[in-house]
């Protein structure tokens, strides 16, 4: 019996994963790929407005707060859910308050006179999509300005962020609703007729005809609603730096590639997941295994940072968050 125990011990020493717990931890890197912080956090969101939103706890009980590039606390870890700061404000949620989402400023103060919303999104181009918690508009989405006042009244089943002066909205809810686009006055400018609508970037937006995730019917439209790239894609994301990550054909079988605005393949299909370029770098997953294979490519498709990360965020203002698996007893 003692001999059996010794064998087990030796196996544990030789195969650390059998005796240690793999933990997904977060570090920050600069645009050269240099790690600028220790992996002390368990979750992070893209860098914006000079801070990272990070999680300290590593479980459903872990709290969120905000730190600078030196891991110095900017706003204490007291929130159950958060989104990044944009344009000076961030949406946050505290379960203990038994209330809804609200916005804070960079000092952690409750903004907009203490207003609450059933759900809230980041600011973009001076407006933020919020879901009303008021009885007469309960559950409907509208848009507020940076004074916290409604400029587009709650009326939509869903609402996206503004980009290039245009935002996606859904008329109706879920699969009973259809999506299109509005301008900053809340006027419909592209008829709602799609299952899903992405953000406009470089004058184009990805849209999907049906709710069937197995159907290759993503395509791209311009700001007039005209189809520019036909509905042949199993999945499609936004254009950045002149390229967009797409799957051509069956999304359950094919890999991501990058195309230009004419639909030409510029970087061959080879990625299990892929995101748009930010600051001429794109986060891609190069192997199928969970928590491995993430890194960054340049516009030619060359791997320039990582390749073995457990996760990657988009680059923003020269910085990104990357995940690594470390073994802890």
Image (spheres, rainbow, N blue to C red):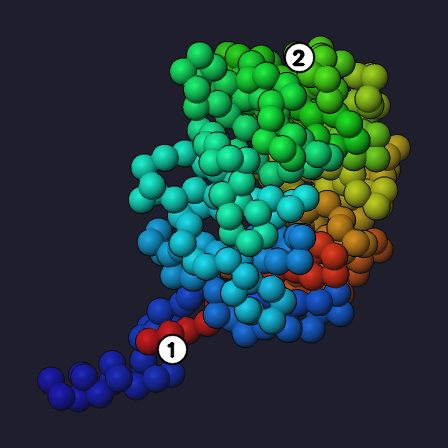
Circle 1 crowding by C-alpha within 10 Å: few under 14, some 14–19, many from 20 = some
**Cα separation between marks 1 and 2:** 54 Å
Identify which residue, 253 or 70, lies in the foreground: 70
Q: Which residue is drawn at the image coordinates 73% and 22% (left, top)? A: 184
Disc 2 secondary structure class: strand
State whether residue 15 appears in this view.
yes
Closer to the camera, 108 or 314? 108
Quarter in which the N terminus is drawn: bottom left
Give the number of callouts. 2
Element under label 1?
A: helix
Is 225 in front, or is 317?
Answer: 317
Residue 281 position within the rendered picture, expressed as x and y whole percent measured from the top left: 76, 56
Instruction: Name the residue carrying label 1.
Output: 16
Which quadrant is the C terminus positioned in? bottom left
Reading the image, the residue beneath label 2 is 192
Q: Is residue 194 above or below residue 241?
A: above
- Looking at the rendered image, the disc whose residue lies closer to the viewer, 1 or 2, is 2
Give percent across and percent down for residue 266: 84, 45
Indicate the position of residue 277 as horizontal and vertical percent values. 76, 49
Q: Residue at x 38, y 74 (%)?
A: 328
Question: In this image, 149 relative to 240: left or right?
Answer: left
Residue 80 point in image, percent of width and height: 40, 48
Say whether disc 1 or disc 2 marks the residue closer to the N-terminus.
Answer: 1
Q: Residue at x 64, y 73 (%)?
A: 36
Q: Residue at x 65, y 21 (%)?
A: 151
């Amino acid at each position: 019996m003692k001999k059996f125990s010794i064998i087990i011990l030796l196996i544990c020493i030789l195969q650390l994963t059998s005796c240690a717990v793999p933990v997904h931890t977060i570090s920050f890197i600069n645009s050269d790929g240099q790690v600028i912080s220790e992996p002390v956090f368990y979750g992070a969101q893209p860098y914006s407005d000079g801070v990272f939103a990070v999680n300290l706890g590593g479980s459903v009980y872990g709290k969120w707060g905000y730190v600078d590039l030196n891991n110095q606390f900017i706003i204490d870890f007291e929130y159950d859910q958060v989104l990044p700061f944009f344009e000076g404000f961030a949406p946050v949620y505290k379960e203990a308050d038994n209330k809804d989402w609200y916005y804070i400023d960079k000092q952690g103060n409750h903004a907009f006179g203490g207003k609450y919303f059933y759900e809230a999104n980041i600011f973009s181009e001076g407006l933020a999509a919020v879901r009303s918690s008021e009885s007469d508009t309960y559950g409907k989405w509208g848009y507020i300005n940076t004074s916290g006042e409604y400029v587009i009244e709650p009326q939509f089943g869903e609402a996206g962020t503004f980009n290039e002066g245009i935002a996606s909205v859904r008329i109706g809810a879920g699969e009973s609703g259809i999506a299109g686009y509005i301008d900053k006055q809340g006027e419909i400018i592209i008829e709602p007729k799609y299952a899903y609508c992405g953000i406009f970037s470089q004058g184009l937006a990805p849209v999907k005809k049906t709710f069937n995730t197995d159907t290759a019917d993503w395509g791209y439209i311009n700001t007039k609603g005209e189809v520019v790239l036909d509905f042949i894609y199993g999945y499609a994301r936004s254009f950045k730096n002149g390229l967009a990550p797409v799957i051509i054909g069956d999304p359950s079988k094919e890999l991501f590639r990058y195309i230009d605005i004419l639909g030409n393949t510029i970087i061959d299909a080879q990625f299990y997941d892929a995101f748009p370029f930010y600051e001429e770098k794109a986060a891609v997953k190069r192997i199928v295994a969970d928590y491995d294979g993430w890194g960054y490519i340049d516009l030619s498709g060359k791997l320039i940072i990582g390749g073995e990360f457990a996760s990657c965020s988009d680059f923003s203002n020269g910085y990104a968050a990357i995940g690594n698996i470390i073994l802890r007893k």
